[in-house]
Amino acid sequence: MGKGKLQRFAELSSYDKVFQPSFDELLNADFTYKGDWKNKVFKNNNPIVLELGCGKGEYAINLAQTFPEKNFLGVDIKGARMWKGAKYVSENKINNVSFLRTFIEFTPSCFEKHEIDEIWITFPDPQLKQRRAKKRLTSSVFLSKYKEFLVTNGTIHLKTDSRELYDYTMALIKHNNLPLFEHTHDLYSSTLVNEILSIRTFYETMFLNENKKITYIKFGLGKVENIEEPPEES
């Protein structure tokens, strides 16, 4: 590991807006702040929004500055990327953004039932190989995990350059009869684009420069008890 990366990891540990539970802590028990994020971390009763696979936290930070009445939490395992967002939040004293460094698989150990109001998934690895389908962040495996802590009427946003991931997620939504609120396979040519959906991460800017179309889906999990893979993915 390079000297610069080591320095970033050291700085990351010094930020009071960053939480880094150990692997063993989440594997064998619940995280300290499970059920207490509002009271002990954000110190208010405002809704909590997750950015899963947050990278540098660009979406969480921009959303937080637009919606000061909400709390935002970026989740990712890659600390070197998270460092940039955490540094910006610390230097600019943005009080409604925090970061959780962990695997997304462990999120049920971090959040209580109905503790999260909204989820953003921006430009995740589409995991295109068939054998890796269940590792997609909108797979039945992950949606079942989100269902453990998302409020019943909560929303999930998927923004991606991958038409394959878009089509897969739409098929899963249809197969499980999940609430579908908005969708487009070409965001910037649609009527849906607005100030919020125009927030551009590092990866989105790169994809747009490559003339790739950006897709978007807004959906919910409703009251469906068991979420299943669409037939072609089973």
Image (cartoon, rainbow, N blue to C red):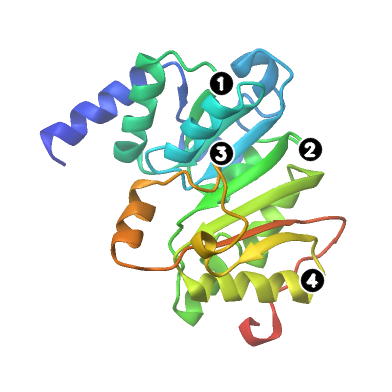
Q: Amino acid at mark 2?
A: His
Comparing labels 3 and 2, the label whose residue is closer to the camera: 2
Comparing labels 3 and 1, the label whose residue is closer to the camera: 1
* SS assignment at label 1: loop
**Residue 148 appears anywhere in the view:** yes
Q: Check disc 2 and report the residue beneath it.
A: 114
| Separation of marks 3 and 4 at Cα, in angstroms | 30 Å
* SS assignment at label 2: loop
Which sits earlier in the primary sequence, circle 4 or circle 1?
1
Whether pointer 3 and pointer 2 mark residues with C-beta atoms closer than 8 Å, the reply is no
Q: Residues within 10 Å of mark 4 (few under 14, many from 20)?
A: some
Q: Check disc 3 and report the residue beneath it.
A: 26
Q: Position of residue 223 (x, y in %)?
A: 87, 56
Q: Is residue 62 above or below residue 168?
A: above
Comparing labels 1 and 2, the label whose residue is closer to the camera: 1
Which sits earlier in the primary sequence, circle 1 or circle 2?
1
Q: Position of residue 148 (x, y in %)?
A: 75, 47
Q: Amino acid at mark 4?
A: Asn
Residue at image coords 38%, 54%: 204
Q: Residues within 10 Å of mark 1 (few under 14, many from 20)?
A: many
Q: Residue furthest left?
A: 3
Which sits earlier in the primary sequence, circle 3 or circle 4?
3
Q: Amino acid at mark 3?
A: Leu
Which quadrant of the view contains residue 70? top right
Quarter of the image where the N terminus is located: top left
Which disc number belongs to residue 96? 1
Residue at image coords 44%, 79%: 129
Whether pointer 3 and pointer 1 mark residues with C-beta atoms closer than 8 Å, the reply is no
Which quadrant of the view contains residue 210? bottom left
Which disc number belongs to residue 176? 4
